[in-house]
Image (cartoon, helix red, strand yellow):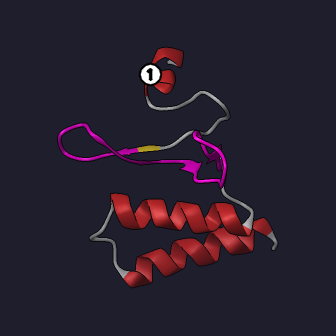
Amino acid sequence: MLKLMAQFGGPHGVPYFVFFDANGETIVTSDRPVAGSKRGDNIGYPDSPEEIEWFMTMLKRGVPAMGTDETQTIESWLKHASGK
């Protein structure tokens, strides 16, 4: 598992997400871009506003067919669960 995580940018936190296309190419990972950092910052379980925003970006890139109602439901749930 560690070899697989290292191949896709981890391990530097769990959970670590990688979304793939049909050819097995990486679409996006849970490494949220951070100014001045080559690697980014793994959002893990998204519960801060920045992490939730990046998770929603991941979903939009990885599952472009997901409808607005579905994405809004997920985002609302994450925000509610975070208590923020």
Three-letter amino acid code at disc 1? Leu
Hey, which quadrant is residue 66 in on the image?
bottom left
Instruction: Residue 54 in the image: state x and y as whole percent.
Output: 57, 62
Task: Return the residue nearer the eye: 37 or 9.
Answer: 37
Residue 3, percent across and down? 48, 15
67 and 49: which is toward the camera: 49
**SS for tag 1?**
helix
Residue name at image x 55 percent, y 60 percent: 55
The reply to whether the magenta stretch includes residue 30 is yes
Residue 21 image point, x, y percent: 25, 47
Q: Is residue 29 magenta?
A: yes
In magenta, the rendered stretch is: 19-43
Q: In this view, does 8 lie above or below 53?
A: above
Residue 16 at x, y = what percent?
Answer: 56, 39
Query: Residue beneath label 1, please?
Result: 4
Q: Which SS type dominates the magenta stretch?
A: loop
- Residue furthest to the right: 83
Q: In this view, does 16 lie above or below 83?
A: above
Find the residue positioned furthest to the left: 23
Q: Residue at x 81, y 74 (%)?
A: 84
Q: Quadrant of residue 67?
A: bottom left
Q: Residue at x 62, y 78 (%)?
A: 76
User: Mark 1 packing: few (<14 Cα in 10 Å), some, or many (20+)?
Assistant: few
Which residue is painted at 66% across and 49% down in the image?
A: 36
